[in-house]
Amino acid sequence: MGWNNRYGWNDCCDTDIYSYYSQTIFFRPILRIEFDQNESNTFTPAHNDTKYLKIRVLNSGKNTARNCNAKVKVIPYEVHHFMDVPSLDKYYALVWSSEPDLSDLKDTVDIQKDNWDILHVVFANSSFPSKQVSAPTRYASFSKKERLKTNRLVIEDSFTVGDFLIEIMVNSEETNTKAHFKVHVDTDYMNLSMNMLPQPTKIEKIKNKFSNFK
């Protein structure tokens, strides 16, 4: 066996090296978060006195993204009283579901290549303002599994009226992705909305990293 002049490695290692790179780089899953408020049936549906905000997670890579799980946190934004928002910088687990009756709530999913799944993020119910909590009136909640099932409000993961920045992180065994959104909560549950914020470019990410050393 000799040195491979074209590729620069020993012939005996060719198969192992190719296998490694094919699994970790060239053929890995690639997750992307999508949101379009104009597609209300998918991203902002309302039924049974409840409005939901959801995102779609697409796998545009070459392999299945296994055991995808998601979490969300509130990012400190302007001046919010600590009683008005979920606990700052604390992550909350979100759930996946594509059925209107929430019959298929899942903590994790496998997303096949060129396929997608739907993730619940925030929801508001018409009954929320009348629910008694020892805090300012709550109008929306993060879409944790137990909250979606019962419509129960808990101070630590629910919102008063206002605009809030959130970060959604999606992880699989092979990769991850994240996105930032601005959520608007109103006294009328039907006015619950959110907008996806522009993601920083690779150059901007590098600049931000170097700025930390100044």
Image (spheres, rainbow, N blue to C red):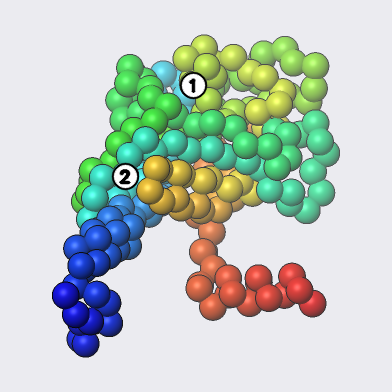
Query: Which quadrant does the N terminus fall into?
Result: bottom left
Q: Nearer the viewer, mark 2 or mark 1?
A: 2
Q: Residue at x 70, y 33 (%)?
A: 86
Q: Residue at x 46, y 52 (%)?
A: 177
State the CA–CA distance, disc 2 to disc 1. 22 Å
Disc 2 packing (10 Å; few <14; some 14–19; many ≥20): many
Q: Amino acid at mark 1?
A: Lys
Q: Amino acid at mark 2?
A: Ala
Q: Residue furthest left?
A: 1
Task: Give 174 or 129, whichever is nearer the viewer.
Answer: 174
As displayed, is residue 180 above or below residue 150? below
Q: Secondary structure at mark 2?
A: strand
- Residue behind mark 2: 65
Q: Is residue 139 left or right of residue 116?
A: right
Task: Please identify the quarter of the rendering in which residue 21 is found.
Answer: bottom left
Task: Give 48 or 93, whichever is nearer the viewer.
Answer: 93
Task: Please identify the quarter of the rendering in which residue 55 is found.
Answer: top left
- Residue behind mark 1: 145
Query: Which quadrant does the C terminus fall into?
Result: bottom right
Q: Residue furthest front?
A: 1
